[in-house]
């Protein structure tokens, strides 16, 4: 993998980690259809840590407020912290039990394309949900979103799309759904990176590491800003058509290439 290929994958990761179109699905499609190597586990960790930095930068005020509230034993912050912790448990268990099987699905373009089509359906129906007021993040609703996040470990299922839409279905306001989704992403992304560190081969060039990290962080911040704007405007369902088009294209290229 050269620096150009590293940049391509970093842009794909940065855009699709937050836009509701599945980063895992797009990385798999880019690797298989564009003949760009995925870069291995180590590079995948670098890309995800880059996008994690984007979340910290975008939501740093919320993160500081949450930590301060927990230290000061404020009920609202403690409930949110516990909800984030409990909501992370299902995806952690699923990753430990089925990680190898899920990884094997990345090379199955029929599965990835079908999962992208499913993501499109979730996004489409989210547009039918009326906008809720500031209802507050409750433990029950938060855990429900955490359970939905488990689906997103499948390649082709969008983590942000699934969790935000579930939050909307559960009664969160648009802003609450987006904020909770990305706060929930922090332990999920960080935990996955830590889990995979012992198995990663760090023989990749340092230049590729820096390129992937910086590009995915910068592009990810821009994509996150854009998505939050779309969510607030109630335009999330528009991404459904993109997911369906990519799914059909992936199926077509897979069948045509056989």
Image: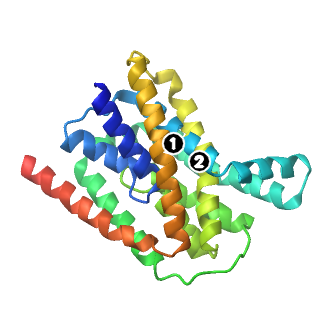
Q: Are marks 2 and 1 in contact (CB under 8 Å)?
A: yes
Q: Specify few, some or many for label 1: CA neighbours under 10 Å numbering under 14, 14-19, or 20 or more.
A: many
Residue tagged by mark 2?
A: 55
Q: Looking at the picture, does residue 131 appear above or below residue 102?
A: below
Residue 257 percent coordinates (x, y): 9, 47
Q: Quadrant of residue 44?
A: top left
- Is 64 on the left-hand or right-hand side of 250? right
State how far apart marks 2 and 1 are (Cα): 7 Å
Q: Residue at x 35, y 69 (%)?
A: 240
- Is 237 on the left-hand or right-hand side of 53? left
Residue tagged by mark 1?
A: 51
Q: In which quadrant is the N terminus drawn? A: top left
* Of the pair 111 and 191, the residue shown nearer to us: 191
- Is 250 on the left-hand or right-hand side of 148? left
Residue 127 percent coordinates (x, y): 46, 78
Question: Mark 2: which secondary structure?
Answer: helix
* Of the pair 163 and 101, the residue shown nearer to us: 163
**Residue 64 in sight from this viewpoint:** yes
Residue 98 percent coordinates (x, y): 46, 42
* Of the pair 222 and 39, the residue shown nearer to us: 222
Q: Specify few, some or many for label 2: CA neighbours under 10 Å numbering under 14, 14-19, or 20 or more.
A: many
- Name, please, the residue furthest toward the top: 203
């Amino acid at each position: 993998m050269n620096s150009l290929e590293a940049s391509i994958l970093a842009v794909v990761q940065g855009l699709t980690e937050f836009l509701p179109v599945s980063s895992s699905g797009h990385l798999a499609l880019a690797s298989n259809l564009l003949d760009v190597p995925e870069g291995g586990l180590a590079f995948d960790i670098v890309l995800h840590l880059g996008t994690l930095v984007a979340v910290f930068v975008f939501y740093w005020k919320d993160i500081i407020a949450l930590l301060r509230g927990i230290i000061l034993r404020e009920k609202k912050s403690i409930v949110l912290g516990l909800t984030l912790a409990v909501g992370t448990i299902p995806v952690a268990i699923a990753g430990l039990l089925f990680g190898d099987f899920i990884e094997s699905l990345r090379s199955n373009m029929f599965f990835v394309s079908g999962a992208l089509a499913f993501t499109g359906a979730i996004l489409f129906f989210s547009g039918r949900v009326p906008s809720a007021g500031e209802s507050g993040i409750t433990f029950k609703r938060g855990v429900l979103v955490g359970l939905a996040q488990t689906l997103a470990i499948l390649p082709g299922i969008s983590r942000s799309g699934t969790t935000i839409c579930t939050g909307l279905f559960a009664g969160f306001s648009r802003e609450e759904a987006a904020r909770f989704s990305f706060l929930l992403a922090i332990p999920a992304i960080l935990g996955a990176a830590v889990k995979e560190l012992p198995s990663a081969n760090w023989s990749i060039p340092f230049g590729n590491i820096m390129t992937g990290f910086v590009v995915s962080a910068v592009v990810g911040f821009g994509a996150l800003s854009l998505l939050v704007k779309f969510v607030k405007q109630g335009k999330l369902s528009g991404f459904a058509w993109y997911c369906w088009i990519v799914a059909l294209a992936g199926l077509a290229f897979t069948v045509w290439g056989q």
